[in-house]
Every structure is written in C-alpha cells, then in structure tokens.
Amino acid sequence: MPRLIRSAALNNYVELSRSLGLDPYRMITACGLPAACLDDPDTKVPLASVIKLLEQSALKSGKPDFGLRLAENRTLANVGALSLLVREQPSVRKALDTLAGYMFLHSEAFVVRIIEQDDLVIVDVIIDAGRPVPMRQAIELSIGFLHRSFQRLFRERWRPQAACFAHAAPNRLDAHRRFFGTDVRFDQDFNGNVCRRRTAARLAVSAVHSHLTRAVRPRLDRKAAHR
C-alpha cells in the first residue's frame, strides 16, 4: 500500500506557487494529486506524490528554498487535533514527546524521535517514502514546520543549537540562516534540530487547558488503538 499523508501538508501551496509564477493546479494534477485534496486538510493523499510536487515546484520556480517558504507561516494547527494536545503541555520537552508519540496520525511515514545525548536533546525527523527518492524539500518543510511551530508556541524559550540536514548544502545559505536563526549544518547523519537539555526543560509560556483539549487525548488514543 502507498504511504499516505494528510493533505494539510499542502496548506498555502496554492498561494506560494502562484506568487512564484507557477500554476498550482496544473502542478498538482501532473504529480497525480486530485485538486479536491486542497479543500479538506484531512484527506489522505500519497506521500510520494506530495514529495514529487515539492521537488518539481522548487525546480520549476528556481527556488531551492521552496520547502522553507512553504513552512514560513505554518503553525501546530497543521497537524490537526494533535495540536491541541501539544499546546497544553507544560514544557518544551513534554510538547516534543507528545508530538513524537502521535505524529503517525498525520502520516505513518513520519517518525519523530527524541534522543538524549550528553547535554543535548536531538529531535530526529524521519520520512519513510518506501523507496529512495529525492526529498530535500519535504525534509526542509517538515523541519521548518516543527521549528516555526515551536517558535510561535514557546517564543524565546525555543532556542535550538542547530538545524541539521543529511543532504548537501545549497549554493547560498542566506534563506536557511534567516529562517532558523541559528547554526545550520548539512551533510549530517540525521535531519532535525539539536537543543540543550535546559532548553527542552523550559516551561511553556502558558499551557492551554480546556474542556476541548481534555477531550482530545481519548479521541487520539482511540485512533492510535486502530493503528
């Protein structure tokens, strides 16, 4: 079976591609995606088609930072109901653990691992496309989403030491340095963020608690039980 992902991964794709001179619906159709997937963020679509769309969009627009541009305005809302659960966590580490634990609800091809190594906490983002395919844009979109979402949620409390990528560096690093505001490393052994333990231990500015968020975990757990 093909690996699937919620079409929320394409939020703002139409606006960005048009601003760069692309025809978004022609691009989507050419990559085997139904145009209707843009109407419902919970529609599951083939991950391979989304990866191909992002790579083709970067190539045809001449913008090697296409994935980062798409991540620019992302928030936790992009992962649906899971965002409510993440937002109610009392610390950066608890929020990371929650996101990692339920990320498969967004796509079973996505894995987020939290690894402790000496004084560091490594947020390792894995995309399993089922076969080796170029996915620079999907990787940068994913890590950009995580970084921007936690930046908005925790503000100055989210300060990674570095953003790391397994692929090679682009010709210019300006866009990556501006986006992450920290050290950006390429040709690494993993894709993700690195932060200090004390950064991960920082408390949330104000965790969100409500009847709605208390109702979310049982619903997500029921989905997890049918995984």
Image: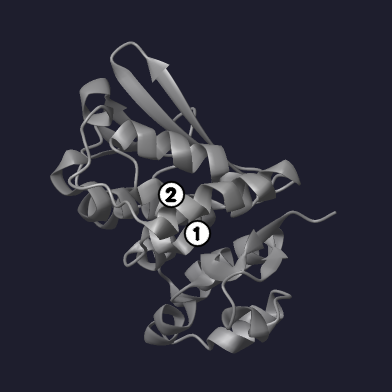
Residue 119 visible to the viewer? yes
**Residue at the spot 28% in from the left edge and 35% down from the top edge:** 91
Residue toward you, 142 or 205: 205
Number of callouts in the render?
2
Percent coordinates x, y for residue 101 in the rendering: 54, 37
Q: Taking 227 as reference, is 127 left or right? A: left
Q: Quadrant of residue 66?
A: bottom left
Position of the N terminus, as image quadrant, is bottom right
**Residue wearing tag 1:** 81
Tell me, yes or no, whether the two marked residues, 1 and 2, touch with CB atoms within 8 Å: yes
Residue toward you, 197 or 23: 197
**Residue at the spot 49% in from the left edge and 27% down from the top edge:** 189
The amino acid on which the numbered mark 2 sits, given as a three-letter code, is: Leu
Q: Is residue 209 above or below residue 92?
A: below
What element does badge 2 sit on?
Answer: helix
Residue 64 visible to the viewer? no
What element does badge 1 sit on?
Answer: loop
**Residue at the spot 48% in from the left edge and 76% down from the top edge:** 13
Q: Which mark is residue 85?
A: 2
Query: Residue reaching furthest left?
Result: 156
Position of the C terminus, as image quadrant, is top right
The amino acid on which the numbered mark 1 sits, given as a three-letter code, is: Ala
